[in-house]
Image: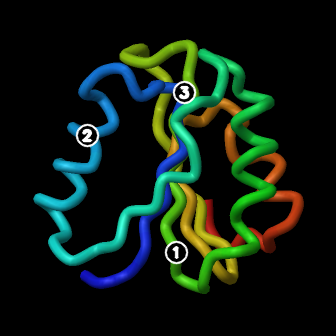
Amino acid sequence: MAGIITLLTDFGIEDSYVGAMKGVILSLHPGVTIVDITHQIPSQDITSGAFVLSEAIPFFPKGTIHIAVVDPGVGGKRKPILIETDKYFFVGPDNGICSIAMQREKVKQK
């Protein structure tokens, strides 16, 4: 699978979480390009994460997969979501992290 996967998280850059996430992605899909939007969203600040995601997405080509993880309930029972729009795919927790982006994009499937 060639293509682009973006990452936006509140993980910070002081530990191994971002590296581990990238390692898993590359193990599953060698050759994909991973772009860090940011890992410095304030901890558990879904609104900030949603805003930054919505501001970044217009600059990526069609087919880009955007992964956003800002979730106060990480490890809890919240289900992940996959949203397909005319241009992109969005993956993240079902907590509103993609809500502002969905105001810009026409949702095909959720």
Circle 3 residues within 10 Å: few <14, some 14–19, many ≥20: many
Q: What residue did someone put label 3 on?
A: 10
Residue type of the residue flagged with mark 2: Gly
Q: What residue did someone put label 2 on?
A: 19
Looking at the image, the residue that sits furthest to the left is 27
In the picture, the disc for residue 64 is 1
Residue type of the residue flagged with mark 1: Thr
Callout 3 touching callout 1 (CB < 8 Å):
no
Mark with earlier residue (3, 1): 3
Circle 2 residues within 10 Å: few <14, some 14–19, many ≥20: few
Mark with earlier residue (2, 1): 2
Residue 35 in picture, x, y percent from top left: 46, 61
Question: How many numbered marks have been drawn onto this rendered protein structure?
Answer: 3
For the residues carrying marks 2 and 1, which lies nearer the camera in this image? Answer: 2
Q: Is residue 27 above or below residue 31?
A: above
| Residue 73 seen in the figure | yes
In this view of the protein, which residue sits in the foreground, 85 or 70?
70
Quarter of the rendering occupied by the N terminus: bottom left
Q: Secondary structure at mark 3?
A: loop
In three-dimensional space, the C-alpha distance between marks 2 and 1, rounded to whole angstroms, equals 20 Å
Q: Residue at x 21, y 77 (%)?
A: 31
